[in-house]
């Protein structure tokens, strides 16, 4: 039986999970493939010994011992971050190794460099685990939906942010408190910036957009807003309107330009994405042929991510065994078919909005506010005024019909400069419901 | 540029959809694959001419002209049903053609014959479109989740039945009325037996179980109950308990035996499967590594099914071009690794139950019923008695904790033989919630 040798760099959470998956599923994978996957070596500078059940695997300190080993066919990089991961991957490619990685930060920012290097050496780079953890989202987009023009991508792609928002929604607890609890439980990192500020979600959106559209997308193309400013009061008002607040990655394809944004979004509570619980991810594609497809599962974690990494290892091994390397292009389109991306300017975006305006509780205030919105071409769908407080500041909550981002910016600048509005207005975008357009 | 020639048998709804997808997506597929897919010929005995935009496609009457054409690489069978589809596919294989089909009735009943014939000629048989319409469920199971032991399969796999149940639930209309309306609108066939009696769902479950477990599963292994006996009153009571009734295919993997059943099921209303609307399908896998994965999308229809058929055509074409035919085994496990299936006897099944007992409205009735259930080891979780009607017949609605199918059969036989119970008891299984086990 043919053996494919795998070398693993990084034995942290996902690395050790991947090693476990390879070991535990070895017999099953042989029954599926007819060849053997052998984890030959693991490199990790922080690990002194491997658990006893990894009898046939060698532990080394220096990643170089992995990527220079002539016996190794596939190098799995699971240390994360930009450096030294980037260098290790480029070195592995230079030595003619195929590469599998879960590194979304790296692929979204240095993907083109890596894929070009791989193409030059005719090796493959698998990155299924970089988006949606264990969910086979990359394979579905590249192969299952190959016969589609992708019209939109929409999804919950960060389990930590989703967990925090759900906890805030279900228990009415403020952001900082939930974050602290999540950190104590190990659900959030010590530095949660990437997760809660939408950066990790943006990394994933870059990867999906590139593959969906055959366009070169950069991280700087994505407009990013996180969830750290979400107030429980906005979650409550959202509920009154029949919405739940979710951190969504959204890209609508307008043909000659494409949207690229990550921000808190009010989602109708009957929508599938509104019901994605806890640490789960949900990724929604709309194809011109297939219509709506949603893929749901655990977006992170040791074994789920390991499952996706090993799926890539199997996929590449099948190509090695069959002499069919690069049978499917890494980015779904052939390298010379990937065009520069043109991003819809954020000012041109149109969607319904939620505003929470903090206004003095005086007669005529609503008329003033409505006037400003109307003069900017923004139509009000409904208004909630709660907790009247004579002479004090009260929230005036407004849900609009579809309006352009630029007119909203103009209107809110006017409103926030009024003496009767002592605090900055909170603005949250509402998911455009197909039945809900003003037209 | 290399050309792969496709011959299509059957130009009905899915056939013409597939032809459209091939034509409309031709340029995009070239950008992805580097080769050309050409729909060379279409065979259909009922069609006199193809629409004008199929300029390069020849219409023939006799399917033989497709499968004997030496130029044709892939034969796509989309006539449905057992014969002549089975003969056409076997003839195509005999002539060395690869085959793509959406025919779940055929694959679930004659799959082994077809796959063996294909293996002997070293050609491939693609059947992505046979389960879940446009959703890439077969590819996800075979490749994306390859590194998993599948612990359970659960899903809504028939859009017609789901549409009817949803309509009954949302509008309180009886089955026959909704069915008639669905037929008038073209959402249900003139003979709806396969869809509403669960047979179509069972076909799909056979296919998924075979691939998930590497077991030979037969249609007769599946216990099948349809939705034609569901009464709106049971939908109402389900709502009182926080459930929605769905037609589910369910298979739990117990290692040395596996469950295989299709029946109406009460699903907690917060569950993802409870929220699958209209003509959509939702297919849920639990893997030992990946945890829960749900795939959602349109389970039928011209273009969605066409999208899946063409995905298979692309997949096989890539293998032809790369000389990598049968790179992934058709049934996910290597042919010699597919073992006979052992099915859990239905009597051994354990789950919570819903009973609607029609009883005379007399003192002591509940005590009698509860006594019979208790004597059979069935514990009551809650009871609803609605619409008291002195001396008449009233529904006594009971929700049990987990109980075995055999004790339920025994208890209900006893109850239904009582003079105070003039009508047969209605029994609906409740989805086992993970938090809800009696243990």
Image (tube, coloured by chain):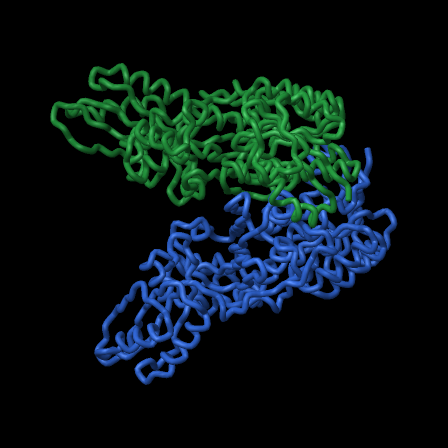
Chain colours: A green, B blue
> In the figure, residue A410 lies in which quadrant?
top left
Image x and y of residue A236, in percent: 28, 36
**Residue at 28 percent of width and 33 percent of height:** A173
**Residue at 36 percent of width and 31 percent of height:** A184
Image x and y of residue B293, in percent: 52, 45
Q: Given the current orientation, which residue lies at the most extreme right position? A: B70
Image x and y of residue B264, in percent: 46, 63
**Residue at 82 percent of width and 56 percent of height:** B120
- Relative depth, front residue between A356 and A211: A211
Q: Is residue A291 visible?
A: yes
Query: Left or right: B194 with respect to A70?
Result: left
> In the figure, residue A225 lies in which quadrant?
top left
Query: Left or right: B285 with respect to B373?
Result: right
Task: Look at the image and tell me in which quarter the N terminus of chain B lies.
Answer: top right
Above or below for A217 versus B426? above
Above or below for A129 versus B366? above
Above or below for A14 versus A81? below
**Residue at 55 percent of width and 56 percent of height:** B157
Task: Look at the image and tell me in which quarter the C terminus of chain B lies.
Answer: bottom left
Image x and y of residue B238, in percent: 36, 61
Q: Is residue A208 visible?
A: no
- Relative depth, front residue between B390 and B172: B390
> In the figure, residue A431 lies in which quadrant?
top left
Query: Left or right: B297 with respect to B175?
Result: right
- Relative depth, front residue between A169 and A270: A169
Count of numbered badges drawn on the protein: 0
């Amino acid at each position: 039986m043919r053996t494919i040798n795998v070398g693993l760099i990084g034995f942290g959470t996902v690395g050790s999970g991947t090693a476990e998956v390879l070991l535990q599923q070895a017999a099953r994978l042989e029954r599926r493939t007819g060849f053997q996957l052998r984890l030959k070596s693991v490199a990790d500078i922080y690990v002194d010994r491997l658990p006893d059940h990894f009898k046939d695997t060698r532990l080394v300190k220096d990643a170089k011992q992995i990527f220079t080993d002539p016996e190794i066919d596939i190098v799995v990089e699971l240390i994360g971050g930009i450096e030294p991961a980037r260098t290790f991957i480029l070195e592995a490619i230079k030595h003619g190794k195929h590469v599998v990685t879960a590194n979304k930060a790296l692929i979204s920012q240095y993907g083109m460099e890596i894929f070009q290097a791989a193409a030059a050496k005719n090796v493959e780079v698998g990155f299924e685990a970089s988006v949606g953890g264990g969910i086979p989202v990359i394979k579905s987009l590249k192969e299952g939906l190959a016969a589609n023009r992708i019209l939109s991508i929409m999804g919950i792609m960060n389990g930590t942010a989703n967990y925090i928002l759900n906890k805030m929604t279900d228990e009415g607890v403020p952001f900082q408190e939930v974050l602290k609890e999540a950190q104590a439980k190990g659900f959030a990192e010590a530095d949660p910036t990437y997760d809660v500020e939408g950066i990790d979600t943006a990394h994933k959106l870059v990867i999906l957009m590139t593959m969906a559209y055959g366009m070169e997308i950069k991280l700087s193309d994505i407009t990013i807003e996180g969830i750290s400013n979400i107030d429980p009061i906005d979650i409550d008002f959202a509920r009154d309107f029949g919405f739940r607040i979710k951190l969504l990655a959204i890209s609508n394809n307008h043909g000659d330009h494409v949207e690229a944004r990550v921000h808190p979004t009010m989602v109708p509570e009957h929508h599938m994405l509104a019901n994605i619980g806890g640490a789960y991810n949900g990724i929604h594609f709309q194809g011109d042929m297939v219509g709506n497809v949603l893929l749901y599962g655990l977006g992170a974690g040791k074994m789920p991510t390991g499952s996706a990494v090993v799926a890539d290892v199997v996929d590449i091994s099948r190509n090695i065994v069959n002499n069919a390397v690069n049978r499917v292009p890494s980015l779904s389109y052939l390298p010379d078919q990937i065009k520069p991306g043109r991003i819809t300017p954020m000012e041109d975006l149109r969607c319904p909005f939620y505003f929470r305006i903090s206004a003095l509780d005086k007669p005529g205030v609503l008329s003033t506010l409505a006037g400003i919105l109307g003069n900017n071409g923004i139509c009000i769908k409904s208004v909630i005024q709660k907790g009247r407080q004579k002479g004090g500041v009260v929230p005036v909550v407004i849900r609009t019909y579809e309006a352009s981002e630029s007119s909203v910016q103009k209107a809110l600048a006017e409103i926030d400069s009024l003496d009767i509005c002592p605090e900055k207005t909170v603005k949250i975008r509402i998911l455009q419901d197909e039945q809900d357009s003003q037209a």
